[in-house]
Image (cartoon, rainbow, N blue to C red):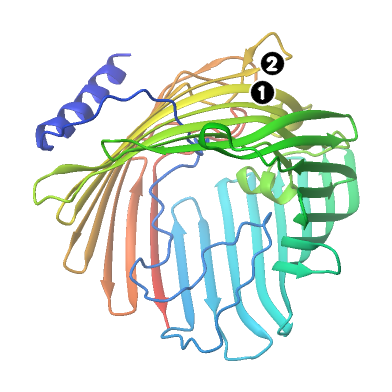
Amino acid sequence: MKRLVVTFCFSLVVSLFFAQTQSLPDMRISGESGVKAYLYKRALLFSTLSDMGDSLPAFIPSNIPVTLDTPKSEKKKYRGYLQGELNAELGFNGFISIYPNISWLNGASDYLEFRSPDSDLWSWRNNLFLGLEPSSEIPLTLRLDFYSSEAKNFSNRNLEAALAYHTEKIDLDEFSLNSFSFQAAYNGLDQTNLTSDYKKDYVDYYCSTILKSGWLNLKCKFIGQAGEGGIQLAPLLNLEPGYITRIRIHLMADSYGWVPSVEFRYSDTLVDGGVFSVGNNPTLESNRFSTLLDVNPWISFSDAHRLQLQPLNLKAGLEFVYPSSQLFSLSRLEVHNASKYTMQCPVYVSTTNYSIPALTYKDIISNQSSIDAFFQMGELVMHQGMDFELAYLSRNSMQRVPYRPVLKLDTRLNYSLSNWLLSMDLLQNYFTKDHNGKNLNESIILNIGAEYRIDNSAIYAQLANLLNQKQWIFSEQPSRKLNIFIGAKYRF
């Protein structure tokens, strides 16, 4: 607790000491902030150059089909990007992206990752993404995602191959399909945990669109994943009472039941220049194997797989943007709150193999409040964030959700000096419990990094977790400690 008080006070005092006085408006606030990753969180320098001047893609969200389509008349200055990174835990990351001058291939990218936090643990991932265009009316994306991981008395192989199509509009005789997305995928899973084998082959699908015909405006989503199916229907009501828009009545259902909800959005520009918004956006999502393995490659799956329904996804926020100044000043302020009820969310539990968790699916009720302040003075940029979250297993006597800290403090500094980019991050996590309900020690993670850029290339290094604090994904697996990252980037 002493370290909490000292560190928080120091960050607050430094911010106020250097910042110019701001005349802030009175605020009645509730806000939104997506749940941020707690573990493995660092100022990852493994990212594309910020001043590339073209549209080289970042990693494409695998759940949302997206094409790499670009206007034919556009002439790209750069057609490729290459990056590699090594770390002291015998880990490796590699990424390559190219835009070949081929009519049927818009772009291609490949991401490689190797992890070995312990001599008994290693994992390998390869993600290949292709933007295809066999004809001008059929833009397609092909994604191949392969995972391989090993631990003591455990092995895992998972292959996901997905072909996706997306278009803004399909006109039919009496109706149209807007924002139409379709994805078909094969998922092959082969696991051995102790003496138990689990092998499954699935054909998954995803389809979402907005059907319009006269007065009808119907949002539709259909999901099939690992043998589970779900549907979400949401007709639009032609009502806008008091500037409330996008009012839809939702019905979400899977193999185990159905749940209703309401979607809406309200936004207002305040007299002092701030923007206040509030809305509820119910969702139906799949808990994909590859997404879960990306967080932790050493987990055991079973037939207990479920889709995820979120009837309550109430988010509200207040944002202010301030004019730039030559002095160290507040440039942006965001205050958010998110109240959520998530059904069938994956949670870790122990198995007979001590270091390998299994997944159980629980209903979670949570409320998260966050404040994010952005400061700037010339080439110096600072972000100070604070998240306060209470998350409980609603059907388990309101037990705390494991591995979610109640309080998170996030301080980030970036400074550009000629060809150098210098960074420092202080990430703090307090009041966390593991899957057995045991209190975990607070973690105070200090990262320092530097990047040097020359024309179209850059080299960088980072000292991560200088205080050598333990970071947990699962308390029966090795924690992450002090590490060193070294990498290089090149565009061509």
- What residue is pinned by disc 2? 394
Determine the residue positioned at 36% across, 22% down. Answer: 28
- What residue is pinned by disc 1? 364
Classify mark 1: helix, strand or loop. strand
Question: Which of the 4 image quadrants contains residue 87?
Answer: bottom left
Mark 2 Cα-neighbour bin, 10 Å: few <14, some 14–19, many ≥20: some
Quadrant for the C terminus, please: bottom left
Please state which of residues 47 and 58 is positioned toward the viewer in this rendering. Answer: 58
In the rendered image, the vertical position of residue 370 relative to residue 103, given as above or below: above
Determine the residue positioned at 59% across, 27% down. Answer: 475
Question: Which of the 4 image quadrants contains residue 31?
Answer: top left
Q: Is residue 339 left or right of residue 418?
A: right
Q: Is residue 391 left or right of residue 388?
A: right
Labels 2 & 1 near each other (Cβ < 8 A):
yes
Give how far across and how far down residue 49 sits, in percent: 37, 68
Give how far across and how far down residue 421 sits, in percent: 25, 60
